[in-house]
Amino acid sequence: MKKEDKNLKLYPKYRPLSRDFLFFYTINVLFLTQIKKIDMSAVVLVDTFYALFVILFQVPATMIIEKIGRKRGMVIGNICNAIYLIIVMNSDNLVHLISAELICALAFALKDIAEPAILHESIISSNVEKSNIFARIQGNAVSGYYILSAISLILSGFLYEINGYIPISLSLVIVLITVVMSTRFEEVEPPKEEKKEEEVSIKEAIIFSFKSKRCRCLLIFSAVFYGVLSVLGTYEISLLENLEIASKYIGISFAILNIVSAISSRKQYLFQKKFKNRTLSIIGILLSLSIIISGGVTLLGFNLIMTLSTIFIMYIIKYIVVGLYNVLLIKYLSNFTNSKIDTKIFAVNSFANSITSVIFGLFAARLLKIIPIPNAMVVFGTFSLIMMIITLIYMKNKVGIDPTKYSEYELKYDNKKQL
């Protein structure tokens, strides 16, 4: 079997297990606040440290992958995630948790660069077809993750009530499985015509990211969207805790929501086909409105059933747009890249995402210090809506225009004239 075919068969099996911490992703807030007795605002702050560490690791991670290859970068990243979980399991203070986040940040800095790159380079096809194959495989992989996540969420809520350490222990087992799976990938040599090209430096990739209007706009949108998501993971669960919802029901709720994201990511092409160049605008606005309404309905004092029903509908909307974002944004960014620059573009994207995660995280943590969670969601949602509108206005006439109107520089590293 060719290296490329082996990677393409393995990736949809590997990615659902490696994308995040199954069994621990949703229950982690409960684990840290109830088992480890960490204050909620401190939990948000720990997440902010993670984002800060990712920023610091972007350039080193890119250099490491360029030196040792994408496969080894994935293996090291998964090993670091195993170490992270072991530290969290045995932590008893905030310093331990921050140290764990440092290791986890290195893990995902490596994985977020290496994983999409090894998939992208394993697809040997024409430019237009390559983009569609990439989106389909990535969509199936993300969809598979959400299905597994849904199952783990249902089980984790019940297992957590039996013993708070069971979910994180199962997560560790899965991470160790991904370590083994990542060793089975193969490095793919770039096409002969690409070998003749000079290697693109990190500096050149950063310059291209800023000078290319289309690429710059996508990176800005991704950063704002991701910055909002990095806060919502904690805010959403905190809002349900504020309403005194039991952990097992929180697990079931997020299991259903993950199934929604699974369907959304698998069917992303239908949404894009219908809304075309308005796709990013719609998912950006819907994300912000879902936050505002979730917090607002809690403040209005409706009965519990009406309040929870409205919140759940808003969460459904949020998870639909997240499923779309996780596939389409990577696809759009890959439209700019060949093997000489792809890892650098993904690194720049991760770097920008981490910056906004730090900024938004600090703001979100401060809000929880001074106002209750429902009020914080309204304020943060309004803030995210303003940021999203500004971003979308800036993107107008720069993304989604007629392919013939893009400059030659915009297509410097790829001949695909779509998006």
Image (cartoon, grey):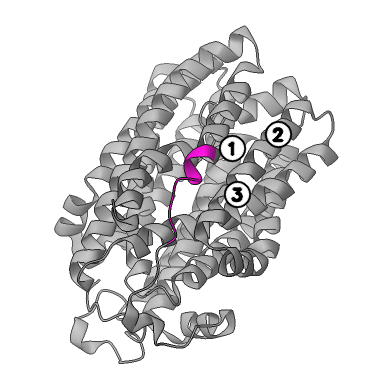
Residue 186 included in the magenta stretch of the image = yes
Asked whether the beta carbons under mark 3 and mark 1 sit within 8 Å of each other, the answer is no
In this view, the residue in front, 260 or 415, is 415
Residue 151 in the image: above or below residue 176: above
| Residue 365 in view | no
If you read the primary sequence from the N terminus, does the residue marked by circle 1 or circle 2 appear first?
2
Q: Position of residue 386 (x, y in %)?
A: 48, 62
Name the residue tied to disc 2: 40
Q: Residue at x 55, y 40 (%)?
A: 179
Amino acid type assigned to the residue bearing label 1 in the image? Thr
- Report the side of 366 relative to 394 (left or right): right
Q: Nearer the viewer, mark 3 or mark 2?
A: 3
The type of residue carrying mark 2 is: Met
Are the residues at dot 1 and dot 2 in contact (C-beta closer than 8 Å)? yes
The residue labelled by disc 1 is: 234
Looking at the picture, tell me which residue is in the foreground, 310 or 325.
325
Residue bearing the label numbered 3: 77
Rendered residue at 52%/17% (across/down)? 157
Q: Residue at x 38, y 47 (%)?
A: 322
Between marks 3 and 2, how big is the CA–CA gap? 28 Å
Residue visible at 30% across and 45% down in the picture: 9
